[in-house]
Amino acid sequence: MYLADRAAPAAQKAGGAGGSAKVRAVTGVVLALGAVSLVTDVSSEMVTAVLPLYLVAGLGMNPLGFGTLDGVYNGVSALVQLVGGHLADRARNHKLIAGLGYALSAVCKPLLLTVHALGPLGAVLALDRTGKGLRTSPRDALISMSTAPEYRGRAFGVHRAMDTAGAVLGPVAAFLILRAATDGYNAVFGVSACVAALGVVVLVLFVPSRPKPYAASPAAPGVDPDGAAAEPPKARPDLRQALSLLRIPRLRALAVCAALLGLTTVSDAFVYLLLQRRTGIGEQWFPLLPFGTAVVFLSLAVPLGVLADRIGRRTVFLAGHAGLLAAYALLLWTPSTPALPYLVLALHGTFYAATDGVLPAAVADVVPEALRASGLALVGTGQALARFCCSLAFGAAWTAWGDGPALAGSAVGLLCCAVAAGTVLRPTARPNATTGARP
C-alpha cells in the first residue's frame, strides 16, 4: 500500500462494537513495548536534552564538530538497523535482538561519566546508537505482527505516545538534576544509566518472545499484488531475500521518499540551538526545549495515527512535513513575539506525531511477515543515513556562512523534496487488494 492507502470501512465494521475494535488495535504486546520505550526514553532524553549544550558550551565544540558528532550519533544507528532487522528475521526471535540493543545502550550510559574528549565521547555515542539500531526494527516488527493492518496507524501511534511520554519526563528530570546537583552533567549521566537498566528489566519480564498473531479480519485476506506475501516462507530468510524487498514498487517508493525528506530534515539539536539563539533563552532552560516538542508529540501521536488509518497515510505524512517547513519559516522570520518558542516547538512536535508512526505503519502493510524487520530496517536506514548527511551539511554550512543561510537552504530543499514525495506517493486508481479499499 502507498502512504495514501486507507483502512476499509468493511474492516472497521468487522471488529464489531467500538470497544472490541480498540482491543484488537492496541494489543498487550504494543502496551508492553510502549512501557519499555517509555522507560528507555526517559534515560535517553535525559542525555539528549543536555548533550548539545554540554558539547557546545561546556566543551567548546564548534558547529561543524557538533554536526559531525550528531551525524555519527544518528548515522551509526542507521547502518546497524539493517543488521538488527536481518538478524531478527533470521533468528525468528525479535525480542532477543531488541533486548540486546536495549542492553547495549544501557551499558553505554555510565561510560559517559568517564569520557570528556571528542574522540572517546564519539565512540561511546556510536556504541549507544548501535544499541538503538539493533532494537528499532525488531521492536516495530513485533508491533506490526501483533496488530491487524487496518489498525496499525493507531497501534504505532499508541506506542509512539508512550515512547514520547518518556521523552517528556527525560528533559524535566535533566532540568531538575542540573538545578539541584553540584556536578550537574555527571549526575544526569549517572541517573540515566540506572533508568536504562530498568528498561531492560521491563522488556525481559513483560514482552513475549513470540506474540500471538492478530485475528485476520474478513477484509484483509490474500496477497498484495506487488509482492507482500500473506504466508512467510518456511526457510529462514537470507540477506539476498531481504535486499530483494526493494523490488516491491510500493516499498521502493516509500524508501526513496523517506530518504529524500531526510536529506532536508535538520537535526533536533540544531533546531533547539537555533531557537535558543533566536529568542535568547537562558542556558538553564535549554533542557526544556525537547520537553515542549515531546508534549505536543505525546498529545497528537494517537489522534494522527487514527486519522492516518481513516483518511490516508500519505496525507498525514506530508502534512507533518508542511508543519516542519512552517517551523523553519518562523525561525528564519523570527517575529518579535513571546509566543515564538511555543509555536516552533508545537510545529516540531506535530511533525513527529504525523510521521514517526505513520511511516512504519505504511511499510508494514507491504512487507511479508517473515521479512518484516528487514523491510522496516531498509526504509529506516535510508532515512537515517539521509539525516546523517543533513547533519554534516548543515553543520558545515552554519560554520561557513552562518545559521540563517544554512536554515534557508534546508527550508528550500524540504519544500522541493516534499513536492517530489507527494508526486511519487500519489495513490493509484485501482482498488487495494489487501483491504478492498480504494487508495
Image (spheres, rainbow, N blue to C red):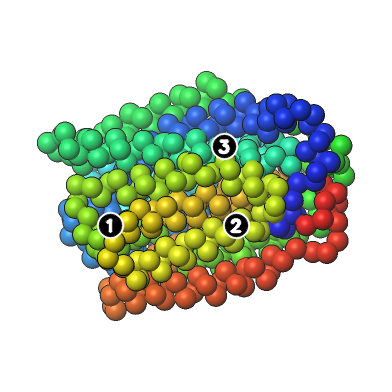
Give the position of the N terminus as an image quadrant: bottom right
Label 2 crowd (10 A; few <14 / some 14-19 / many >=20): many
Q: Mark 1: which amino acid?
A: Pro
Q: Which amino acid, mark 3?
A: Val
* Number of residues whose C-alpha sits closer than 10 Å to that of mark 1, classed few (under 14), some (14–19) or many (20 or more): few
Residue 279's x, y, as percent?
25, 61
**Residue at the far left in the pictured view:** 182
> Which class describes the residues within 10 Å of circle 3: few (<14), some (14-19), or many (20+)?
many
Please report contact status of discs 3 and 2: CB closer than 8 Å, yes or no. Answer: no
Mark 3–mark 2 Cα distance, whole angstroms, equals 17 Å
| Mark 1 or mark 3: whose residue is earlier in sequence | 3
- Of circles 1 and 2, the one toward us is 1
- Please report the residue visible at 27 percent of the width from the left and 42 percent of the height from the top: 112
Residue designated by label 3: 158
Q: Report the residue marked by disc 1.
A: 338
Q: Which mark is residue 317?
A: 2
Q: Secondary structure at mark 3?
A: helix
> x%, y% of residue 409?
41, 76
Q: Earlier in the sequence, mark 3 or mark 2?
A: 3
For the point 78% across and 31% down, the residue is 15
Nearer to us: label 1 or label 3: 1
Residue 75 relative to residue 422: left or right? left
- Residue 396 seen in this snapshot: no
Q: Earlier in the sequence, mark 1 or mark 2?
A: 2
